[in-house]
Image: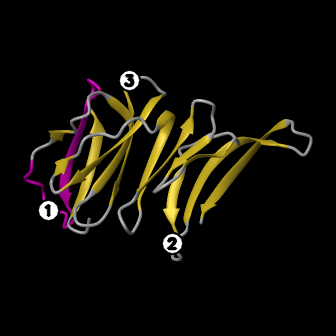
Amino acid sequence: DADNLMAVWQAGDGRLLYRLLPATGEVPNNPVDCVPIGKAGQVQVHGGSDGRFALAYVAGEKPTGAIHTTSFVDGQWQSSSAAMGHGKRPNIFLDEEDVIHLAWCSEEDEVSYVGSEESQIISSFSCGSRPEIAQDSQGILHIIWFGDSVVDVNGRAQPQTLVYESARV
């Protein structure tokens, strides 16, 4: 959003709080409010067009759990999505048409992705970091993550520090 930034953080009791901040740097006069989703963690927020924001989170207080999304549209939070999958470290991205793209590390330590019309496991390579999502100037989505192992030509997992990338055409 060109006019506002959104800050979202977790309170000590597990609730998610948020505040819209003017992009001008002025001191905000709007109150801190609560995202209406209950206890959650591992929050990621991304801004789209016309004051729209999308939020990804892990429901509950455990390190892994159900991955959900919710959107902030026309000044209010929408209902949360059904569980998109289970895991940890979700990341969310709104493309130029405000379509939500979501990537996370599954409970099996694989990179999972949900986009406009597809849901899939991107890679069985280890998911050692939050998958980052970006879109290049040609509209191609890229998902990048850190891994700590690789499978060799004989099918054996070998320890190795690597950065993986998947392009979604």
Q: Nearer the viewer, mark 2 or mark 3?
A: 2
In terms of depth relative to the viewer, which is nearer, 4 or 38?
38
Disc marking residue 106: none
Q: Amino acid at mark 3?
A: Glu
Residue 93 in the image: state x and y as whole percent: 42, 56
In terms of depth relative to the viewer, which is nearer, 169 or 10?
169
Q: Earlier in the sequence, mark 3 or mark 1?
A: 1
Please provide the residue range marked out in magenta: 11-30
Tell me: residue 140, above or below residue 9.
below
Disc marking residue 26: 1
Q: Earlier in the sequence, mark 2 or mark 1?
A: 1
Tell me: residue 58, above or below residue 147.
above
Disc marking residue 139: 2
Residue placed at 37% from the left, 36% from the top? 82
Judge from the rendering whether residue 149 lies leftward or rightward of residue 90; answer left or right: right
Q: Secondary structure at mark 2?
A: loop
Q: Amino acid at mark 1?
A: Glu
Residue 6 in the image: state x and y as whole percent: 25, 53
